Amino acid sequence: MSGYPPEMRESIRKVEATRARRIKETFPAMSLEERDAILQAFHPDYKEETFHALRVGVSKGQRMPIELGKIVEGWPHITPDFDLSEPFAETDVLVIGGGGGGASAALLAQENGAKVILVTKLRFGDANTMMAQGGIQAADRPEDSPAIHYLDVIGGGHFTNVPELVEALVMDAPFVIEWLEELGMMFDKEPDGTMIEAHGGGTSRKRMHSARDYSGAEIMRTLRDEVRDREDDITVIEFSPAVELVLDDNGQAAGAIVMNLETGVYSYIKAKAVVLATGGGGRLHYQGFPTTNHYGATADGVVIAYRAGARLGYLESMQYHPTGAAFPEQILGLLVTEKVRGLGGQPVNAEGEQFVYPLEPRDVEAAALIRECAPVEQGGHGKGVVTPTGQPGVWLDSPIIEMIKGPGTIKKALPAMVRQFGRFGIDITKEPMLVYPTLHYQNGGVRLKPDGSTDVPGLFIAGEVSGGVHGHNRLMGNSLLEITVFGRRSGRSAAAHSQRVKLGAPSLAHVAAWIKELDEAGVDTGVISPILLPDYTRHQ
Amino acid sequence: MAEQQDNLIPIYIMGKQYMVPSTLTIMKAMEWAGYKLIRGVGCRGGFCGACATVYRIMGDPKLYFGLACQTVVQPGMYLAQIPFFPAQRATYDITKLEPTATTLFSIYPEVLRCLGCGACSKACPQEIDVRAYMAAGMRGDIAAVADISFDCIMCGLCASRCPAEEAQYNIAILARRLYGRYLAPRSQHLQERLKEIRAGKFDAELEELKGLSKDELVARYKARDIEPK
């Protein structure tokens, strides 16, 4: 039984009718000029009226979505006279964030001699890492090289990436794969051990390593298990998000104020170095978009690092994943992995025709989907499918994969997708999925240096909370890579820093200065931030 | 929203009745009812295992299991979440183990207590045949445990139903890590590449790329050849 209503099934019949022909068709990829034009016209980043320029702080003038600006310019949870004299706990390295970046940092800090406390907002592992499906890039085949990977990354990022960060990313990549193998991660391999590697959007070589379509989950649960095995040196405290950084009287990181989410109690955790790995902000729902992100993705790290004096960058650029679920309503916005297209799946319109090369960089692909659905009078093509609740989308033809790669491919390579849609009566081996772009990733964030350091001495950073690695657009498979590469680097650097730093008296002078600056600038967004969780309760 | 409100159904959250729209998932229904969730919520996409839920439908004695973020409400649904389950977990040093049955049995002796009743498989929201991988574990077949358990999200529902007090999902991840580290064939091309990087083979090229102007990079980017599918 099909989970689609009759009017949608009618369009599916057109998709079926063209399938045999489309197998042989390759839709041409866009030139750089065509890419620019479609981004300008249809990508959400180019809607000027939805952006805000910061009025306070060290990156005054930095543009970002209005929803993000409102919380970055927010008021602190605590007052500057918060008592720091009796810390709740003390450690060498405090890691804030329990995703893949934080776990990697904790492991490397521990290996380099540090005692570690890892605090996380929800449970350890409740993070976007867990949800990443497609894979992790690393140039480890003879046909490939770190230099080719470098070009792909920088071209996909519109040539605005920080070169030294890209170098770190691509040169560390094969070492990260080996590290994960050593920890016991199960990569997809041929019987002789050769990695099974696929293309992703914007890659010129097949370098996507995967673990079925649970790639991120497999990385996360492996790293988490290893952290738990080192419980003598790494203490994990769950349901305790950081709400403010603490500096010493010389402006060096000296720990953080965390909040017990269940009791509401704030406490000071003192540390000689801090690693911030809090992820992005999809749950702020920029421009009303649904999101692929986990429940706690509210850009906390950007907020607290900025108040402590770290510069921001690239936050005018957010990533909308081209293929979020558009039907059924219950899973609106959830990720449909790019691996579907990597395996040969094609986006097709209501008429069953291709309209875009399936593996453009994500921003370009997303813009093309938006154009296909937009009404003709707005410059669009008006060839989307509209669901009974009014949500537009285009088909992502998955059954074609089995015609290309053989029966059974989907079940083996995409079990999570099969399960996700199967719960709603849709068999993706036989019927396509309806998709539309969804808010996925924060390209920018806190400015990062190759060793994981920031503008604030003793504050290190890893993952989506940082900015610069991906320029203005990240390629698929480079975020699982980023969190491990820079998680490891920041953990190592934080341990070294903790061994040489002489901490002065802990202080919240930066919080007092922040409040003063807001007051003097007359900025009052009416928000206490970080907001920690979105509010989805019904307000009548 | 108006359309939804025409079609409200009764559900019972820990025994208390709420009228909620019939199209919502359990998680969204709880929020619609006014719960601001802290426990029992995580990725909201079926990957993290935070929202394990047990429910019964009024008049039906059978227990059902699901993820709150992936299960649509039904009229007369009595539900409770299991946001945490106190399951046994051993600590070990993965680098010092051998991928053998003996390792499995010494770290988790309770593997051998499995009764084969299948309550775990019935409870699994991922439809994993937990009983089958536990049976493989009793045979010491680590590769089979790793393969069958691969889609596990470690929600804990299996452990919550087990009369033998197994923590199946912790046993399974030990097996997967043993498989990944010791039994899976190693990648030769990866080792070759690591040697090349250590020997500095790509250093000059990277140095050159970092020094290029945007125009030069654009030219190189356009000229790069694309490996065929």
Image (tube, helix red, strand yellow):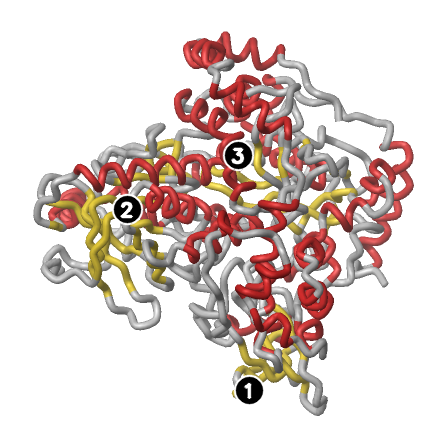
Residue in the picture at 64% in, 45% down:
A211
Report the amino acid beneath label 2.
Answer: Ala
Name the residue located 63 percent from the left edge and 26 percent from the top edge.
Answer: B189
Q: Position of residue B101 (x, y in %)?
A: 64, 60
Subunit under mark 3 = A
Instruction: Evaluate if marks 2 and 3 touch, with contact meaning CB atoms under 8 Å apart.
Output: no
- Mark number displayed over residue A478: 3
Left or right of A412: which side holds A158?
Answer: left
Query: In front: A245, or A380?
Result: A245
Expressed as whole percent of the image width and height from the top left, the position of residue A414 reads: 72, 48
User: Chain letter of disc 2?
Assistant: A
Instruction: Tell me which corner region of the image, top left, top right, bottom left or bottom right, holds residue B163.
Output: bottom right
Of circles 2 and 3, the one toward us is 2
Which amino acid, mark 1?
Answer: Gln
**Label 1 crowding class (10 Å Cα cut-off): few <14, some 14-19, many 20+?**
some
Q: Secondary structure at mark 3?
A: loop
Residue type at numbered disc 3: Asn
Distance from disc 2 to disc 3, alpha carbons, whole Å, reads 28 Å
- Give the residue pinned by disc 1: B17
Residue at mark 1 to residue at mark 3: CA–CA distance: 46 Å
Q: Is residue A398 left or right of residue A471?
A: right
Q: Are marks 1 and 2 in contact (CB under 8 Å)?
A: no
